[in-house]
Image (tube, coloured by chain):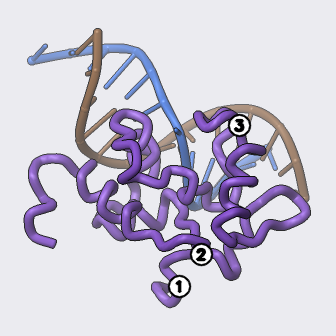
Chain colours: A purple, B blue, C brown
Amino acid sequence: MDKIEREGFFNRVYEAVGQIPSGMVATYGQVARLVGAPHRARYVGFALHSNPLPGEIPCHRVVFADGRLAPGFAFGGEAAQRELLESEGVHFLADGRVDLDISRWPAGLE
DNA sequence: CAAGTGACAATAA
DNA sequence: TTTATTGCCACTT
């Protein structure tokens, strides 16, 4: 937890996302806050896109504040992501959104 | 060096 | 209620 701060705020995002357990999802804003960037939500997603670090960064576990996914993700679409998250054990709403009420990773953060 | 861009979030209409 | 716009701040060109 000390070596992470190299020069990239990105690396912190990677760490935070990498700590998301299966069956859980974190929102960009939450990850941003965890890395110490309450208003850098945009950049959190940018970090994942810029440097996917395949295998180290479960981007599919990161969703919008509404529990929604990006309108044109990379895995093949939001639908593919839904399947993937369901496979992890994440609950979904009828609206196609993640059930942040239970699948929210920083449970108890507040 | 300056301007543009971007997997979001919050507020306004 | 949903849709549109603005603001954020670091990285890219």
10 Å neighbourhood of mark 1: few (<14), some, or many (≥20)?
A: few
Kind of residue indicated by mark 1: Ala
State the quadrant of the N terminus of chain A.
bottom left
Is A12 on the left or on the right of A34, as rendered?
left
**Residue at position x 32%, y 60% from top?**
A37
Q: Chain of mark 2?
A: A
Residue C11 in the image: state x and y as whole percent.
25, 32
Is A23 on the left or on the right of A110, as rendered?
right
Q: How many angstroms separate mark 3 from mark 2 (CA)?
A: 21 Å
Residue A82 in the image: state x and y as whole percent.
74, 53
Please identify the residue farthest to the bottom as the structure is shown. A108
A73 shown above or below C9: above
Give the structural element (helix, strand or loop) at label 2: loop
Residue underneath mark 1: A107
Confirm whether circles 1 and 2 share one chain.
yes
Query: Which numbered disc covers residue A77?
Result: 3
Task: Judge by depth and name the residue closer to the eye, A75 or B6.
Answer: A75
Residues marked 1 and 2 touching at CB (< 8 Å) = yes
Residues marked 1 and 3 touching at CB (< 8 Å) = no
Of callouts 3 and 2, the N-terminal one:
3
Kind of residue indicated by mark 3: Gly
Of callouts 1 and 3, the N-terminal one:
3
Residue underneath mark 2: A104
A19 shown above or below A69: below
The mark closer to the camera, 3 or 2, is 3
Name the image quarter holding residue A22.
bottom right
Q: How many angstroms separate mark 1 from mark 3 (CA)?
A: 27 Å
Task: Judge by depth and name the residue closer to the eye, A32 or A51.
Answer: A51
Give the structural element (helix, strand or loop) at label 1: loop
**Residue at position x 35%, y 65% from top?**
A16
